[in-house]
Amino acid sequence: MGMDADVVIVGAGPVGSALAIMLGRAGCQTLLIDRCQFPRDKPCGEGLMPAGNRVLEELGIGLRDFPSISGVTYHVPGHGRAEGKFMTGSVGRGTRRTDFDKMLADHADATQNVETAFGCDARDVQVGSDEVLLGTTQGQIVARFLVGADGMRSRVATWMGWSRPARSRRYGLVGHLAARDHGIDRVLITLLDGCEVYLAPSSRDELLVALLGAKGHLRPRGVTVRESYSRRVAQAHPELAGCQQSTIHGAGPFWTRPSNIASRRVFLIGDAAGFLDPLTGDGMTAGFVAASKLSHLLINEADASAAYRHWEAKQWQRRLFMGRLALALTNTAALGRRAIRGLSKRPVALDRLLEVNEGSRSLRSLSPRDWAALGGF
């Protein structure tokens, strides 16, 4: 049986599309499929950290039409705020998914050695010794490798027997607010009783605002989703109380991790390989960095799966630590207030933590004074 592609990627979101571009440019025959047509919307934090921005810049994909993000601010009403900035010369981006996904999917479609099939739904997979057979609504596909870039509830992971239930009871309500010439160039995270309000610029005249927390805190009994969302937004950002709201989408539960992320011929990447919590804002960035690594391994390594598992485990360990740290500080009011107080006095500590979060700095590089600031000292 002849091969239809060297690599077939299920999921043409940002990470799947970026991987297809990388593989195609390296001469690898790649097929990118997605059951959706583009543009499409998706609940997301829409914040791209500088490390992810750099990956796309190296591909020659400019994001100047997307709003810049200079750092992250944490705020506890009545107890102050701590402002962290990205390292000198680094910038993140607010990436409205309807525009961002389509742009990257279009880039992939125009890349030599890449074929796309949008509106094509994957249905099952069979893994052989020398090939992968992927059943789809447009027929069977034969490839050397299969990559699941199909999100937090990955069907590729399910077909491989790797999926596991979410370990968190945290959810999100995600919407957009019309805010003409808002001038916001950073992610703002407001810690309220029982939930966090995450705000990021999605365009010059629009803001993404997400509520993160347990179901009971996001929508108390007897209150509609829209009413609860509006109240929490007004509590965190009174200046936005009158802004027009878009449709509000739900997301979660969070904190998923499959039992495996690579076998000999099948790989998971992006949210399919594990999703922690939107609060850290590193999901897409981690996916782009992983795409850069996996593309190199698929082309150059005889045992790409072992090398990918080894590399990805180290990345996950760092992300897991930062995710647990963020949730510990936000879920305990006293710890959160102490951290805000300490980091406001030593903002360089927050700058460094942002670099650790996106992977451009190691945990070992943090000084005792940085950790002391995080503890409120």
Image (spheres, grey):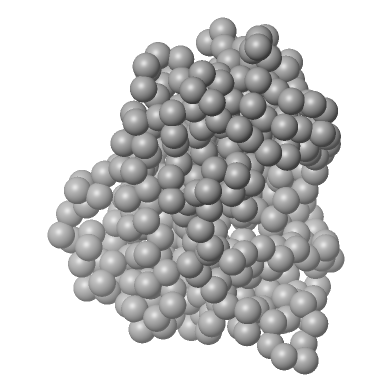
Relative height, residue 296 to residue 199 (above, below): above
In this rendering, position of residue 140 left or right of residue 290: right
Which is nearer the eye, 203 or 297? 297
- Tell me the residue at 44%/28% (across/down): 264
Using the rendered view, name the quadrant where residue 96 is placed: top right
- Tell me the residue at 36%/22% (across/down): 303
Residue at far left of view: 368
x, y (%) of residue 301? 37, 17
x, y (%) of residue 57? 54, 24
Whether residue 296 appears in this view of the structure is: yes
Is the C terminus in the top left, top right, bottom left or bottom right quadrant? bottom left
x, y (%) of residue 370? 23, 59
Whether residue 50 appears in this view of the structure is: no
In this rendering, position of residue 277 left or right of residue 315: right
x, y (%) of residue 108? 69, 22
Using the rendered view, name the quadrant where residue 346 is placed: bottom left
In this rendering, position of residue 173 left or right of residue 242: left
Is the N terminus in the top left, top right, bottom left or bottom right quadrant? top right
